[in-house]
Image (tube, rainbow, N blue to C red):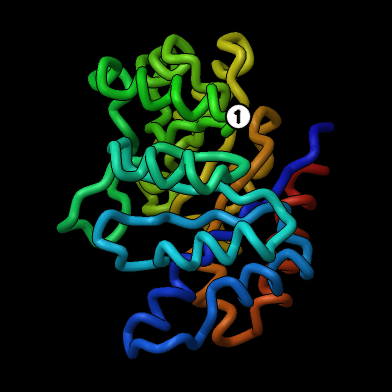
Amino acid sequence: MSVLRLGVNIDHVATVRNARGGEHPDPVAAARAAVAAGADGITMHLREDRRHIRDTDLDRMRATVTAPINLEMAATEEMLRIALAARPHAACLVPERRAEVTTEGGLDAAGQRAALAPIIAALREAGIRVSLFIDPDREQLEAAAALGAPVVELHTGAYAGGRPGELERLARAAALTTGLGLECHAGHGLTYDNVGPVAALPEVVELNIGHFLIGQAILDGLPATVRRMKELMQAARRN
């Protein structure tokens, strides 16, 4: 049975901080609390408009958090420069539109090969583990493998939104990753109520969850919320 890791996305701690300005609540302190409670890694999205974390948050995170850091980033020259300077453990390339409230879909790896190839190559040359956040489609998986990305993160938003057939679609995509030599992660919109079926997919080795955990932490506290999510994930994997 493969180990199932939990990456905690701390972006929305920064969202609360930024709503009023200042330094509280501190996303770096939240990251440390999540790791102490059992998070296996920290995910953070440095958006082009800096609506969530700031550049200084990334610098402080690298300096003080011992767990692996997964930097979500748009495939742009600016973000590439930042990633190469910060050297996080991993970089997950995601689509990004200024007008969107949250990431609305997967990266079009199949349609953007020419633009993605040099960015993936530069990240890999720097020793940064590259993942592509993609929809659970064969064409996108094959493009990710052809581009040399060792990891894919399957977009679970349609599943979390209740669209019929999406769990089966995720299962088929996850099963394809083994033959393509890809490590399989998943995330977006996962909660206590819907995480189980995704966690049970044997090919998935990491779930990245943010908005729900930070929201639930308002009621239960972040350490308790992280521990509960990991319990549900591991129970689903065992069963």
Q: Looking at the rendering, which quadrant does residue 60 occupy?
A: bottom right
> Please, which residue is most extreme toward the front here?
85
Please report the residue visible at 32 percent of the width from the left and 33 percent of the height from the top.
Answer: 107
- At which x and y percent is residue 10? 52, 66
Residue at the image position 64 percent from the left and 34 percent from the top: 204
Image quarter of residue 51 = bottom left
Q: Is residue 85 left or right of residue 232?
A: left
Position of residue 230 measured from the top left corner of the image (x, y, whole percent): 73, 59
Residue located 58% across and 37% down the image: 185
* Point 57% across, 39% down: residue: 90
* Viewer can see residue 89: yes
Q: Nearer the viewer, residue 207 or 199?
A: 207
Q: Is residue 116 above or below residue 75?
A: above
Amino acid at dot 1: Gly
Foreground: 223 or 125?
Answer: 125
Residue 39 higher or lower than 76, as above or below? below
Q: Which residue is mark 1?
A: 127
User: Which residue appears farthest toward the left when viewing the image?
Assistant: 99
Image height check: is 14 above or below 112?
Answer: below
Give the side of residue 185 with respect to residue 188, left or right.
Answer: right
SS for dot 1? loop
**Label 1, residues with CA under 10 Å away: few <14, some 14-19, many ≥20:** some
Residue 124, x across and y down, in percent: 53, 24
**Quarter of the image with the C terminus in it:** top right
Q: Is residue 35 above or below residue 126?
A: below
